[in-house]
Image (cartoon, rainbow, N blue to C red):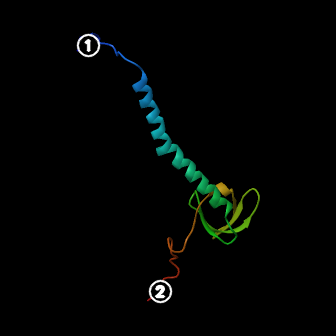
């Protein structure tokens, strides 16, 4: 079996097809991985800059609360257990009523 591979002729020709293939792979990685990550990063940064006092938010750790204060180095979030200070980068998304309805508003029979 090894003899077959040893007898095979070496590649003859130019390196151009290999270089083109590597270039296509780089372009593919850029459009499939790098560009979407940069776009998501821009969206998160713009979201964090548009935070307002009173907005209901969810942190990256899953804590739900309402923004009580916005400071230069972070935000103060009011939760059921009290007020906690977080970095702006720790806020992952806005808590919307349509997406997460309150269970306390349900009608009792």
State the SS at label 2: loop
Q: Measure the C-alpha gap from mark 2 to mark 1.
A: 77 Å
Q: From the top left corner, tell me how far across and down residue 37 is, in percent.
A: 54, 48
What residue is shown at x 50% (from left), y 41% (from top)? 30
Circle 1 is placed at which residue position?
Answer: 2
- On screen, residue 45 versus residue 7, left or right, reads right
Q: From the top left corner, tell me how far across and down residue 12 is, in percent.
A: 35, 15
Q: Quarter-wise, where is residue 6 in the image?
A: top left
Q: In front: 103, or 24?
A: 24
Quadrant in which the C terminus appears: bottom left
Give the total number of marks visible in the rendering. Answer: 2
Residue 78 against residue 89 in the figure, above or below: below
Foreground mark, 2 or 1, reads 1
Residue 40 against residue 26 in the figure, above or below: below
Circle 2 is placed at which residue position?
Answer: 107
> Sequence-wise, which precedes: disc 2 or disc 1?
1
State the SS at label 1: helix
- On screen, residue 82 versus residue 103, left or right, reads right
What residue is shown at x 75% (from left), y 56% (from top)? 73
- On screen, residue 96 versus residue 74, left or right, reads left
Q: From the top left corner, tell me how far across and down residue 72 is, in percent.
A: 77, 58
Q: What label does residue 102 carry, if any?
A: none
Question: 10 Å neighbourhood of mark 1: few (<14), some, or many (≥20)?
Answer: few
Q: From the top left corner, tell me how far across and down residue 57 is, in percent.
A: 61, 66
Quadrant in which the N terminus appears: top left
Question: 10 Å neighbourhood of mark 2: few (<14), some, or many (≥20)?
Answer: few
Q: In front: 58, or 104?
A: 58
Task: Report the residue that reaches farthest toward the right.
Answer: 72
Q: Please say if the residues under marks 2 and 1 sit with CB atoms less than 8 Å apart.
A: no
Q: In front: 10, or 64?
A: 10
């Amino acid at each position: 079996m090894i003899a077959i591979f040893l007898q095979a002729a070496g590649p003859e020709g130019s390196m151009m097809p290999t270089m083109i293939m590597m270039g296509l792979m780089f372009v593919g990685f850029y459009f499939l991985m790098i560009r979407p990550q940069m776009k998501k990063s821009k969206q998160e940064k713009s979201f964090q800059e548009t935070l307002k006092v009173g907005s209901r938010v969810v942190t990256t750790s899953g804590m739900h609360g309402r923004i009580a204060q916005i400071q230069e180095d972070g935000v103060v979030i009011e939760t059921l257990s009290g007020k906690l200070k977080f970095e702006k980068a720790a806020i992952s998304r806005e808590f919307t009523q349509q997406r997460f309805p309150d269970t306390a508003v349900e009608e009792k029979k």
